[in-house]
Image (cartoon, rainbow, N blue to C red):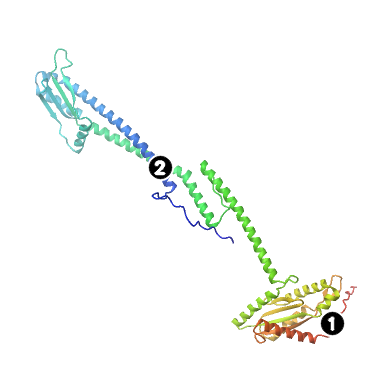
Amino acid sequence: MSQPLQSPPHRPQPAPGRPLRSVARLVRLGQWRSASVALACAGLFMSAASLYSLQQYAQHALAMAAHSLAFAAEPAIRFRDLEALRELAEQLAEREQLASVTVLDRGGQQLLRVERPALGVFDVLARRVANLFMPQPVTASVGADVPGSGLLGEVLLHSDGCVLLGNLGLLLLALLGCVALTALAVLVVSRRLTALIVQPLQAMLELTRDVRTRRTFERRAAATSVLELNALADDFNALLAELQRQQRRIAARHNDLRRSNESLRHASLHDVLTGLPNRSHLFEHLSAVFERCQRQGNQAAVLFIDVDRFKQVNDTLGHAVGDALLVELAQRLQSAVRESDFVARHGGDEFLAVLFPVGDEAEVRLCVDRLRSALAQPLRLDNGQTLPLSVSIGTALFPSQGTRVDELLRAADDAMYRDKARSQGASLLAIPQPEPASA
């Protein structure tokens, strides 16, 4: 299997003094800053305009009240009726919410002063606000509007600021309402931007991480309604497609190399003609079997099998017949042994069978009898003739007849030659005869 992609040795680091921030946080922060600046500018402008309007309204109201008192108090001032003047001043102060009413004569001397006491924290705060926005009293001349009467005096009014403070409170509530509505609008827009920008980016980040760690090149980024993000997704999908093609080419090349290696290993361990394990494979298997026998206390047997008069077959009938004989012999030997046994071509016309495990010599003789029975049927040639099969078999037991590979093979080879000497009178090459025709 191909190895997973390795993480880069060095991750990009942010500039000094600039910490990493998420896109969602940057979007929200930018929206809040923009909304705050816009709201602050609008609030300052609206507040200044509102305060100026409130001041002018309060000044106009006080001027109207001052003219009303000057007109109503003219007879009282003319005839020095201070009681009537006080009553008029107190009524006006109560009705118009004035902090003080001062009446001066034509010489500037004070005739009367009426003050409304502050009854609570609100009144104290309102009068401070009035002193801040309207520090000078509003005045009106008494008798100036009456022809021929001359100037009788002057009225001075100070507002208690309650109306002004109330209007300022309403203005503050309006500003707070604007802030709340702005915050709600920013929240709604932020969520929409998150859905349009942040969520696709997060999905692409998760996709990138999944592709990097699990190599899932078949995955694709989803399309979005944002032009730039959609273009980014298209380019990323094209990159994934190219990586997927590269991965397939690498996998195909890897499979070809694996098959080539397996083919080379099989060729290095097997005989080309018969397909049986070759001499190198045989020695590896014998070493492994002997190690298991020593570890488990079992026995194994080696059968040395040699084709009788094989050279005569090649010289008389040709190498093609000799090769066909070897192939047929290999197939029959392999089919006659157990699944746990091992058959190999030692070289030329020599074969070896490794029996593991075996109990005693009787079990080995039974295996030899099976092999001879498998070879009892002659080989049928392409021309219809038959060729009898004859082999010599020598056996050797591990560990009683040898504890090394060379010792056991030598013992089995010696036993094979003894078996060949006993069967020297048998002729392998009785001249092949055609099969009798069936009636």
Q: Which mark is residue 427?
A: 1
Task: Identify residue type, mark 2.
Answer: Gly
* Residue shown at the point (72%, 73%) measured from the top left: 276
Location of residue 327 in the rendering, given as x and y in whole percent from the top left corner: 77, 72
Q: Where residue 360 sits in the image (x, y, percent)? A: 67, 86
Contact check, label 1 and label 2, Cβ < 8 Å: no
**Would residue 187 be seen by someone viewing this image from the given angle?**
yes
Gap in angstroms between the C-alphas marked 1 and 2: 105 Å
Query: Which residue extends farthest top?
Result: 148
> Residue drawn 30% across and 33% down?
47
| Left or right: residue 272 compared with residue 115 | right
In-image side of 232 versus 268 (left or right)? left
Dot 1 amino acid type:
Ser
Instruction: Report which quarter residue 344 is drawn in.
Output: bottom right
Residue for badge 2: 30
**Is disc 2 placed on a helix, strand or loop?**
helix
Foreground residue, 31 or 77?
31
Q: In screen coordinates, is 137 left or right of 9?
A: left
**Which image quadrant is residue 191 in?**
top left
Crowding near the residue tagged with mark 2, few <14, some 14–19, many ≥20 C-alpha atoms within 10 Å: few
The tally of labels here is: 2
Decide which of 40, 260 is in the foreground and name it.
260
Q: Nearer the viewer, residue 279 or 343?
A: 279
